[in-house]
Image (cartoon, rainbow, N blue to C red):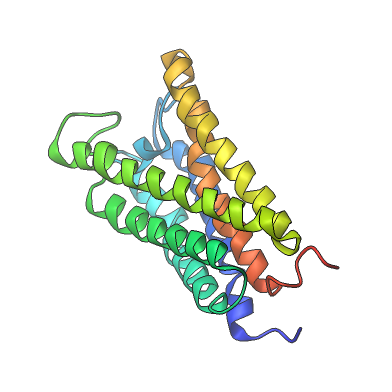
Amino acid sequence: MKKTLINYLGLLGVVSLLSYTSAVIFAPVAYPGYNWTAQAVSDLSAYNSPSKMLWEQLASLYGVCGMVSIMMVCVFIHGKTNKTIRIGIYLFAVMNWISNVGYAMFPLSDSGNAGAFQDIMHIYVITVLVVLFSIASLILIMIGGYRNKKYRSLAIWATAALSLMFAGAIGTGVVPREYFGIPERFSVFAATGFNAVLGIYLFRGFGAVGEE
């Protein structure tokens, strides 16, 4: 298959993942006393966080590249794959919009949960919507993918992402507070990682994946 600009734009999903990963790894350098095993990733970008500026610099490509990639995926799959997978990917795109716009509008006011209005919106509205749309989209992609062996590998990736999300959600509720940050990272990397996976599928033309 001859690649077009849309296919190449899928690689921005990988750039988005790398940008996010670099922010998670290196932003703590500007946050004295930050404990990654106990604290959430969002503490690094909290409104009054000492690492906020470094976070924004390192993660500058995360949001824009991720959005361009997922929207190009939506454009490319029109009329391709089966309807269940398409709906799942469209919902995943909606989740990305909610995440990018919602967290930008309502960053944490302080590390943890200070109880301010924006903290309530960040944790109990935006995060809940992101989780619900993520679960719904991944389940649909799994159903559509396992029905068609042509897209079974995509379904396996969706299963892995959903498993990481559940592991993160369950883990944050059962592990001691000093280890909260470990399972929390399972959840945050699951969505970003799957966005990169979709970008790679776009680069390779979807239908060609798994048939080489």
When the figure is inspected, residue 134 is found, relative to residue 31, above or below; the finding is below
Q: Work out whether residue 205 or residue 29 is closer to the camera in this orientation and state it.
A: 205
Q: Vertical placement of 29 versus 114: above or below?
A: below
Residue 96, given in percent of the width and then of the height, sits at: 41, 58
Query: Residue reaching furthest right?
Result: 212
In-image side of 95 versus 145 (left or right): left
Name the residue at 46% across, 30% down: 169
Quadrant where the C terminus sits is: bottom right
Residue 95 shows in the view: yes
Task: Give the left or right position of residue 33, taking residue 171 as reference.
Answer: left
Q: How many marks?
A: 0
Report x, y in % for residue 155.
65, 52
**Residue found 60% across the figure and 84% down from its top:** 5
Residue 99 on image: x %, y %: 36, 53
Residue nearest the viewer, comparing 93 with 66: 93
Residue 26 visible within the image: no
Query: In the image, is residue 173 above or below residue 118?
Result: above
As drawn, the residue found furthest toward the left would be 117
Which quadrant is home to the N terminus? bottom right
Q: In the image, 169: left or right of 50?
A: right
What residue is shown at x 74% (from left), y 87% (from top)?
A: 2
- The front one of 136 and 212 is 136
Which percent across, then down, holds residue 209? 75, 66
Quarter location, residue 41 = top left
The residue positioned farthest toward the top in the image shown: 176
Residue at 21% x, 42% y is 121
Front-lying residue, 8 or 35: 8
